[in-house]
Amino acid sequence: MEDQAEKLREIMRRRKENQGAAKPSAPAKINAKPLEKARIITVTSGKGGVGKTNLSVNMALAFARLGKKVVVMDADLGLANVNVMLNMVPKYNLYHVIKKQKTIKEILVETEYGISIVAGASGFSQIANMGEEDRKKFISELDALSNADIIIIDTSAGVSSNVLDFIAAADDAVIITTPEPTAITDAYGIIKIIATEFDSLNMGLKLVVNRAKSAADAKSVADRMINIAGQFLNLKVDYLGFIYDDDAVQKAVLRQKPFMVLDPKSKASLCVQHVVDRMDRNKPIEPRGFGTVLKRFFGKEEVTGV
Ligand SMILES: Nc1ncnc2c1ncn2[C@@H]1O[C@H](COP(=O)(O)OP(=O)(O)OP(=O)(O)O)[C@@H](O)[C@H]1O
Ligand SMILES: [Mg+2]
């Protein structure tokens, strides 16, 4: 098994070097106009396959039911699958944006479910290797989505520079794990990186336990993680809720429809609605908007917490 901790340390080393190199450059002035700020929810995990895409898409539907305008962005540039889950084959995706052939607005597609998606770019991992200028441009492109109420970013598993950028942009960084020990260990790994990377920030870190057998099972997983994060990392993590392990999820994945649509009364659907109701009650006072990413990574030190 790969030493995850060493891999993460290496990423952080490279990142620190890059940040150091970026320091002398002038603050980016890409957005002169005031931002209309969407609430940005980044969904991430340590281990792969724990339910990020299912949570992202179904959370989007639950928010849409509350009357919100929602965009799901598939930021998994290795194995994009939001569109697969929705049985859609968009003509253009983030690859075309990164390659500057299209703008984000041009690749945004409506779904039949009342949410829009920005399709990911399967088999394309170059975003992490983009030069600073390109990266800056790409992130500023995301401002085009800011007339949405909610932007849900489905990231790839584990820590990479682009995942950290999206976490930095988030009003709510949702970490998802299952009760499996390996998933918990990897989730803790990513929380630790976030604590190291963003120590001065008041990150809205939220934990979701997926595939739980019972509420008590999920709660004990969450309690353990929250205590460890508090005790050893001095990091506040909120427990957002859990999702039952439910056959309705696999069935929906096979049918390429969200389980909230296919089986709205399923245990998994009710749990997602509960998680979203909870998030909706705990709105950030002032959403950050993507402009903050620019400030954070390419210029000003000062960061406003939410
Ligand atoms: N609550 C659940 N109950 C039962 N099965 C689930 C549940 N959540 C996820 N799964 C199963 O796990 C699979 C992976 O889910 P999903 O694709 O959402 O994970 P992911 O974290 O996005 O994966 P990746 O890291 O590859 O992007 C689903 O296809 C489904 O079979
Ligand atoms: Mg996924």
Image (cartoon, rainbow, N blue to C red):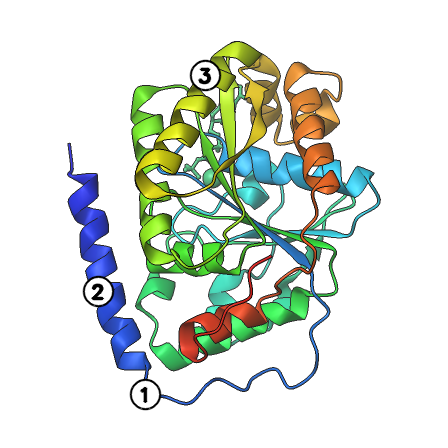
- Mark 2: secondary structure: helix
Mark 2 or mark 1, whichever is nearer to me: 1
* Mark 3 residue's CB less than 8 Å from ligand 1: no
Q: Which label number is shown at residue 8?
A: none
C-alpha span from label 1 to label 3: 47 Å
- Mark 2 vs 1: CB contact within 8 A: no
Q: Which label number is shown at residue 14?
A: 2
Locate the C terminus and report the quarter of the image it occupies: bottom right
The residue sitting at 16% across, 37% down in the picture is: 2
Mark 3 or mark 2, whichever is nearer to me: 3
Q: Counting residues from the N terminus, which is met first, the one under dot 3 or under dot 2?
A: 2
Q: Counting residues from the N terminus, which is met first, the one under dot 1 or under dot 3?
A: 1
- Mark 3 vs 2: CB contact within 8 A: no
The residue sitting at 47% across, 59% down in the picture is: 168
Amino acid type, callout 3: Ser
- Mark 1: secondary structure: loop
Q: Residue 81: where, in percent of width, then height? A: 50, 43
Q: Residue 184: where, in percent of width, then height? A: 35, 27
Amino acid type, callout 2: Arg
Q: Which residue is tagged 3?
A: 220
User: Does residue 105 appear anywhere in the picture?
Assistant: no
Question: Which sits in the foreground, 75 or 287?
Answer: 287
Amino acid type, callout 1: Pro
